Image (cartoon, grey):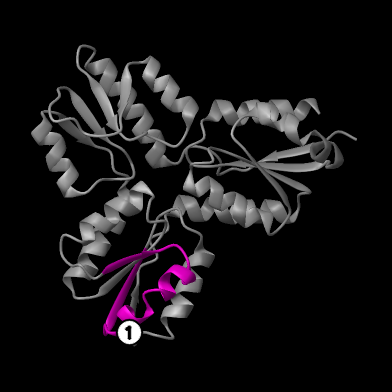
Amino acid sequence: MPKKIKLAKYAGFCYGVKRDVETAKKLKVENPDKNIFVLGELIHNAHVISELEKLGIKTLYEIPESGSGICVIRSHGESPEVMEKIKNAGFTPVDLTCPDVKKVQQKAVELAKEGYFVVIVGKSEHPEVVAINANAKLWTDKVAVAANIEQLKELENVIKTHKKVGVVVQTTQRISTLNEIISYLTTISKEIHIANTICASTSMRQNEAKELAQNSGLMVVVGSKKSANTTHLAEILKDITKTIHIESAEELANYKDLIDKNDNISVTAGASTPQNIIEAVIEELEKF
């Protein structure tokens, strides 16, 4: 019996990532004699970063005291302080912050201005969360970041001293994580304002993948291990069926026995996974 291999409809580049990659390349074409930099890795995918480097689009891991050329702000966003630092160093900033991420920043600022204790649901070290946190802290120091209930419990006494609690969410978070945190907050807070800022692309990707997993013996998740939305996808699916998380087609060889045993395999991919890598994975699976 040949294997049944199904590819998720919502797999690969989301709108924000596609726009960022295409715009960065266009900037280089239109400005061949100018330096084109990106502050931090444009997307969490080593293959794409390598491709951009070959085109002359370089990654900056810190802002130098002085420089020249264009500095791209990636989809994760940055704080106003960083934006000023880029300008003061001599770069021309091009802001490619994802519109969905902008909405989270704006909502966090709005809640801060209205006197809420702001809870940001997400990983404190993730660049998107760092930027949301920095924007909110321009207006208040009453801000906390928590990726789970355990982290929030450490702040329970502080939260209890505030009448109003406002919640925003990292765009690539799991809805189950948000629900767990809200359930906990309702036991210690009198007034809660919840802004479900998980982006539509993330929700559709996760929901479709869950449906596929229910009818698949094996789920293959393709994307960088550094990508938050990809790792969350793999975590969700592992609770439903056998799931492997790979970055490239070459890694499938490590799971030969598992693939051989399953005739019904579905493939999904994170928002920063290029189409050519997804296609290579499908092609490799068809060889089994």
The residue carrying pointer 1 sits among few (fewer than 14), some (14 to 19) or many (20 or more) residues within 10 Å by Cα, namely some
Q: Quadrant of residue 254?
A: top right
In the shown orientation, is residue 250 left or right of residue 63?
right
Vertical placement of 31 versus 172: above or below? above
Q: Is residue 155 magenta?
A: yes
Does the rendering let one see residue 100? no
Q: Quadrant of residue 288?
A: top right
Q: How many marks?
A: 1
List the residue tagged with mark 1: 160
Does the rendering let one see residue 31? yes
Which image quarter is the N terminus in?
A: top right
Q: Residue at point 38% right, 22% down?
A: 52
State the residue lying farthest toward the right.
Answer: 1
Q: Residue at point 59% right, 34% down?
A: 247
- Residue 207 in percent (x, y) is at 58, 56
- Residue 266 in percent (x, y) is at 70, 43
Q: Residue at point 29% right, 43% down?
A: 97
Q: Residue at point 26% right, 26% down?
A: 37
In the shown orientation, is residue 218 left or right of residue 41?
right
Vertical placement of 227 versus 149: above or below? above
- Residue 137 in percent (x, y) is at 20, 61
What segment carries the magenta color?
143-168
In the shown orientation, is residue 43 left or right of residue 235?
left
Secondary element under disc 1, as helix, strand or loop, is helix
Q: Nearer the viewer, residue 166 or 212?
A: 166
Circle 1: residue type: Lys
- Residue 195 in percent (x, y) is at 35, 68
